[in-house]
Image (cartoon, rainbow, N blue to C red):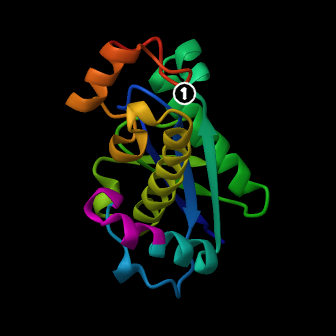
Amino acid sequence: MTLICGVDEAGRGPLAGPVVAAAVLLGKDFPVHLLKDSKKLAPGKRMTLETLIKEQADGWAVAVVSHRRIDEINILQATMEAMHNAVSQLQKNHPITKALIDGDRSPILSCETETVIKGDDSIPEIMAASILAKVERDRIMAAYDEKWPMYRFAKHKGYPTKAHKEALKQYGPSPIHRLSFRY
């Protein structure tokens, strides 16, 4: 039996917070027509779909790699580590035979891999992974916003917006900023 999961990440570009990856195994009855690239969905719709995916997908896993680890090994390697960890978690209960990875680079996995450029816009399993990764990362950044409200993480999620850069100039980096990134 062939089991194919989709894999995507959220958080490669921000100046703060973790990178999050998800792996999703959809069943044949999953309503894939509801899925889209997470970036093309309103936050409320993403959260509704997150619930649907977690309740109706055949399997899913989310993995988080911290800003400290990003600083240690670089963002590309941290992204690959998050993707590897998400697929490995999923494989504990599902004998995944192939992973479809969004983008042009693949982590080393114990199953076959295939990269798909813009897969988050065309492959339902990757779309689902994109949604889980984005919602989880946004949730983490909203929690950080409560701890360090002056940075407004809930609004920009750590991405290098004008307001974020101004807060960095005024307050310096927070404990969750990626120190290996240029501000």
**Residue 76 on image: x %, y %:** 45, 25
The residue closer to the viewer here, 142 or 117, is: 142
- Residue ID for mark 1: 78
Most prominent secondary structure in the magenta stretch?
A: helix
Closer to the camera in the image, 45 or 176? 176
State the residue at coordinates (57%, 79%). 27
Percent of width and height locating residue 103: 35, 42
- What residue lies at 35% left-to-right and 60% top-to-bottom? 38
* Image height of 54 relative to 136, above or below: below
Q: Is residue 44 magenta?
A: yes
**Number of numbered tags placed on the structure image:** 1
Observer able to see residue 127: yes
Amino acid carrying mark 1 in the image: Ala
**Whether residue 27 is situated above or below residue 168 in the rendered picture:** below
User: Residue 78, percent across and down?
Assistant: 54, 27
Residue 82 picture location, percent across and down:
59, 38
Say what secondary structure mark 1 lies in: helix
Q: What is the quadrant of the N terminus in the image?
A: bottom right
In percent of the image, x 29 and y 47: which residue is there?
Answer: 117
Q: Residue furthest bottom?
A: 29
**Left or right position of 66 against 124:** right
Q: Please report the residue visible at 33 percent of the width from the left and 12 percent of the height from the top.
A: 182
Give the extent of the magenta segment: 38-47
**Can the viewer see residue 183?**
no
Q: Quadrant of residue 170?
A: top left
Q: Nearer the viewer, residue 134 or 120?
A: 134
